[in-house]
Image (tube, grey):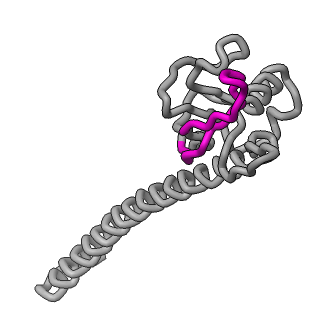
Amino acid sequence: MKNLAVRYSKAQLKIQEMAFVIVAIIIFFFIAGIFVLNLWGTGLKKDVEMQRVEKAGEIALKIADSPELSWSSSSSLCENCIDLDKALSMKEMISQGSNYKDFWRSDISAIRIVLIHPKKTGECTKFNYPECGTITLFNKSEDFQYFGSYVSVCRYDEKKGGYFKCELGKIEVSPRLLE
């Protein structure tokens, strides 16, 4: 057998260098592509969160206009007004296990009504009503963030011969969190 001596020429060395440069360029574009996809994915998540906030505000207004909570009297019909008496009785029915606990959409984890002005504190029950500030209709989870819309919150006040009293409030909805 003959021993073949391998000789490298300058051309072969240049071909190897060019191959390494091409591999390095491919790796660079791959890493840059991953970075761009990551940035695009972050923007996509922000867009989804923005849509969820907008949707929660719309759902809050729809809930305020639902016959179960909307304010209506013989003298006037108020758009986006909530009847506090109806809301308190709805809360009691939900806590007693009625069919209303699944009445609203499954992508909502909590609904509450907050009195903003005049400022009152405490969760409403039938014992401290109307001297309370919040009615939580239901809360399905502990990890939530509220979004909502401002509404008029009205009730019948028996003082001074009986009249309808409306205050500034906010209906807040907590959508389910992204997983």
Residue 70 visible in this rendered orientation of the protein: yes
Q: Is residue 60 magenta?
A: no
Q: In this view, does 120 lie above or below 10?
A: above
Q: Which residue is drawn at 42% across and 61% down?
A: 43
Q: Residue at x 77, y 47 (%)?
A: 75
Name the dominant secondary structure of the magenta segment: strand
Residue 81 position by quadrant: top right
Q: Which residue lies furthest to the bottom in this view?
A: 11
Residue 55 position by quadrant: bottom right
Nearer to us in this view, 162 or 127: 162
Q: Which residue is drawn at 72% across and 37% down?
A: 83
Q: Split into 4 quadrants, where in the image is the C terminus?
A: top right
Nearer to us in this view, 33 or 62: 62
Q: Residue furthest right?
A: 99
Q: Split into 4 quadrants, where in the image is the N terminus?
A: bottom left
Q: In this view, does 33 lie above or below 102?
A: below
Nearer to us in this view, 2 or 103: 103
Residue 136 in picture, x, y percent from top left: 65, 28
Q: State how many labels appear.
A: 0
Residue 111 position by quadrant: top right
Q: Which residue lies furthest to the top in this view?
A: 127
Left or right of 120, for residue 83: right
Residue 70 in picture, x, y percent from top left: 74, 44
Residue 60 in picture, x, y percent from top left: 64, 47
* Magenta-colored span: 147-168
Q: Which residue is drawn at 54% across and 39% down?
A: 168
Residue 7 in picture, x, y percent from top left: 16, 81
Nearer to us in this view, 88 or 153: 153
Q: Does the magenta stretch include residue 163?
A: yes
Q: Which residue lies furthest to the left in this view?
A: 10
